[in-house]
Image: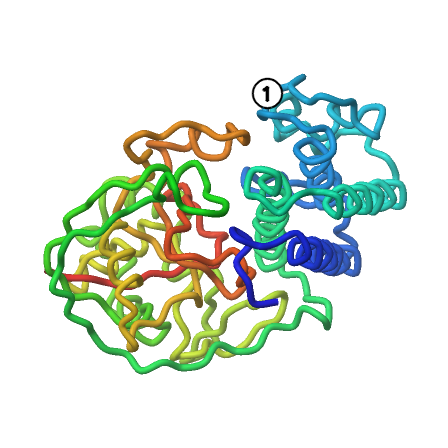
């Protein structure tokens, strides 16, 4: 389905919500086939898969069926379909680590709950007007399930779980590498108050940003390019690393990216539980911000600012390729002027200052959620995302 969820109509949303749920269940089938449907390691960026399934349904119930106007506990107009729904699935009141020890309903009962929520959401949607305000909670629920689906896919990769046949990804195509010179200018970052459709709160509001002239890679840094940095002792040479990067390197004892391993003279990498020969021309993935910064220092380049990235993509330059992986920027994740949290109050505000702005999309990001305006964010030391980087210079 090739549409943007931001302006999706009632009928388009109905189809997309079904599609998103089918994808979520297919991802969970991969966990179940590996015997990991219930238990995965306790890590700060992921939840137990069955808790995640119940939470995704709870989120849609909270905003659509229970008509909550905010994410504050007790702010829903109606009670949950589950007697202990809020006690189990409200992230505001259920600490992350405790989600591994909850006595949740059986997997079959959780799936029944999810189906019932979706059926009621679709029924209510069929009786909802097509204006933006009325469709806001449905678009929010769809975007949320799409984003949580990508996190579930990241978990499959991190835990080395084979993908179900329906999810098998095609190899990334090779793209011609090069540089593009941009003349610079003033762009409007953020959403205009009168713009139609859905916007995330961290995209509010539009404000002018001057971008000086710059040069940017037309594609992401490839495995072949990054392997030159590795071969040149990049991980052993502290001069390429910031202090935070050196601390990260010491903690993790790395000599190459997370999923690389030596096999004689060649590199292998792990892709969803399978070891393959490292594809030389594919973008390097699963790097922390510190690794991307170290490569840039080694190569005499730098990461793009968030404004440069958006300027380049909005230019429509035919040689610029984006969407294979998320991309690190050198910009800290901060609010735009005039920011105010939306109904999902904990989406952006708790992460300002501590996280880094990440732009683009990955092969695991549904096309309907992709946008040059979409701001994702990540802690500098995290590498589980399908994330890479490109370099810039003035």
**Would residue 347 be visible to someone looking at this image?**
yes
**Would residue 365 be visible to someone looking at this image?**
no
- Residue 5 coordinates in the image, percent (x, y): 55, 54
Q: Is residue 47 above or below residue 146?
A: above
Q: State left or right for residue 125 relative to residue 147.
A: right
- Residue 85 coordinates in the image, percent (x, y): 78, 28
Say how the picture is coloured. Answer: rainbow
Q: Residues within 10 Å of mark 1 (few under 14, many from 20)?
A: some
Could you tell me which residue is drawn at 64 percent across and 43 percent down?
Answer: 138
- Residue 167 coordinates in the image, percent (x, y): 67, 68
- Residue 126 coordinates in the image, percent (x, y): 75, 48
Please name whichever residue, 379 or 257, is drawn nearer the observer in this view of the structure: 379
Q: Is residue 183 above or below residue 131?
A: below
- In the rendered image, the quadrant that contains the N terminus is bottom right
Q: State left or right for residue 160 relative to residue 191.
A: right
Please name whichever residue, 218 or 159, is drawn nearer the observer in this view of the structure: 218
Location of residue 72 (image quadrant): top right
Could you tell me which residue is drawn at 73 percent across and 72 percent down?
Answer: 165
User: Which secondary structure lies at badge 1?
Assistant: loop
Q: Which residue is mark 1?
A: 72
Could you tell me which residue is drawn at 58 percent across and 40 percent down?
Answer: 136
Please name whichever residue, 384 or 125, is drawn nearer the observer in this view of the structure: 125
Q: Is residue 204 above or below residue 119?
A: above
- In the rendered image, the quadrant that contains the C terminus is bottom left
Q: State left or right for residue 258 relative to residue 66.
A: left
Q: State left or right for residue 213 relative to residue 356.
A: left
């Amino acid at each position: 389905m090739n549409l943007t969820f931001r302006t999706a109509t009632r009928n388009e949303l109905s189809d997309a919500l079904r599609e998103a749920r089918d994808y979520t269940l297919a991802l969970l089938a991969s966990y179940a086939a590996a015997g990991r449907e219930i238990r995965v390691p306790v890590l700060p960026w992921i939840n137990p898969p069955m808790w995640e399934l119940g939470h995704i349904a709870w989120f849609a119930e909270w905003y659509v069926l229970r008509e909550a106007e905010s994410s504050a506990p007790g702010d829903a107009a109606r009670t949950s379909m589950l007697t202990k729904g809020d006690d189990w699935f409200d992230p505001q009141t259920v600490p992350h680590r405790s989600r591994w020890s909850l006595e949740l309903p059986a997997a079959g009962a959780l799936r029944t709950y999810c189906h019932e929520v979706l059926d009621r959401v679709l029924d209510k949607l069929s009786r909802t007007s097509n204006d933006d305000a009325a469709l806001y909670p449905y678009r929010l629920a769809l975007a949320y399930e799409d984003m949580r689906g990508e996190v579930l896919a990241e978990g499959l990769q991190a835990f080395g779980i084979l993908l179900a046949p329906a999810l098998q990804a095609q190899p990334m195509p090779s793209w011609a590498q090069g540089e593009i010179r941009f003349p610079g200018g003033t762009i409007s970052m953020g959403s205009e108050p009168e713009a139609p459709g859905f916007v995330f709160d961290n995209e509010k509001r539009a404000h002018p940003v001057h971008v000086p002239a710059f040069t940017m890679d037309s594609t992401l840094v490839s495995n072949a390019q990054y392997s030159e940095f590795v071969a040149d002792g990049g991980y052993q040479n502290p001069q390429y690393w910031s202090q935070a990067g050196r601390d990260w390197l010491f903690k993790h004892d790395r000599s190459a990216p997370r999923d690389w391993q030596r096999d004689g003279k060649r590199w292998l990498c792990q892709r969803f539980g399978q070891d393959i020969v490292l594809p030389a021309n594919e973008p390097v993935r699963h790097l922390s911000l510190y690794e991307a910064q170290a490569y840039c220092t080694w190569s005499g380049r730098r990461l793009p600012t968030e404004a440069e990235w958006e300027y380049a993509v909005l230019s429509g330059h035919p040689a610029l390729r984006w969407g294979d992986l998320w991309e690190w920027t050198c910009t800290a994740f901060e609010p735009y002027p005039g920011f105010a949290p939306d109904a999902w109050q904990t989406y952006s505000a708790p992460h300002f200052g501590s996280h880094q702005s990440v732009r683009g999309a990955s092969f695991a990001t549904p096309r309907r959620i992709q946008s040059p305006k979409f701001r994702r964010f990540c802690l500098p030391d995290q590498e589980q995302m399908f994330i890479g980087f490109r370099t810039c210079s003035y």
